[in-house]
Image (cartoon, rainbow, N blue to C red):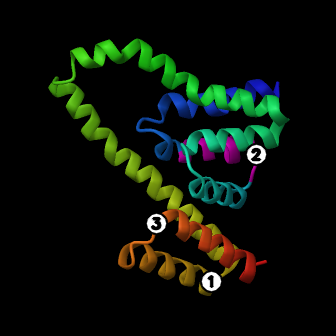
Amino acid sequence: MVYIHLFIAFFIPGIVGYGGGPPSIPLVQNEVVNRYGWMTNQDFGELVALANALPGPIATKLAGQIGYEVAGIPGALVALFATVAPTVFLMIILLNILLKFKDSPKIKLLTKLIKPTIAILLGILAFEFFVTSWDGAGSVQTVILIVASLLLLEKFKVHPAFVILGSLIYGAIFLS
């Protein structure tokens, strides 16, 4: 039964997660944390941070790790398949249709309307991570990490992977 739950938990975000891996993160979080209770918000946030630091698509990294934690190697394979299957099938089936109607005003409007929805979902996820950090690490540590990350990313143009790695090291030293 756990394999079916894993498949569903990653297949649904794969179907409705329009725009790739990052827009799917809140959907995966809902399934993994709220629906099945395999992880806490804090554990999921740490996994997302680690997955962002590694190369490759985030959705498959999350699926592989969560599937492995829940049901070992077979669980990782089921979660990975469920993550990529919707994209593969839809690409094969819909590619010709999309090419035929790519200049349609309705298709352009649909894309324009979906982008704000994705931004809102990512904003909610960021806020939930902020609240978790504020409650878990405290206000001073959270503010230090936010300000340092903002300066490194925006002012000094440090690659996000190095900022995440630095945050992980900071957390290991000061928050353990």
Question: Can you identify the residue that label 2 sits on?
Answer: 37
Q: Does the magenta stretch include residue 65?
A: no
Residue under circle 1?
A: 141
| Dot 1 and dot 3 residues touching (CB under 8 Å) | no
| Residue type marked 2 | Gly
Q: What's drawn in magenta, residue-wise? A: 25-39
* N-terminal label among 3 and 2: 2
Q: Report whether 25 appears left or right of 137.
A: left
Which residue is depicted at the point 62% across and 76% down?
A: 134
Q: Does 81 sit above or below residue 176? A: above
Secondary structure of the residue carrying numbered label 2: loop
Badge 1 amino acid: Gln
Spatial CA distance of label 1 from label 2 is 27 Å
Say which label, 1 or 3, has the lower sequence index: 1
Q: Is the magenta stretch mostly helix, strand or loop?
A: helix
Label 1's element? helix
Q: What's the residue type where badge 3 is placed?
A: His
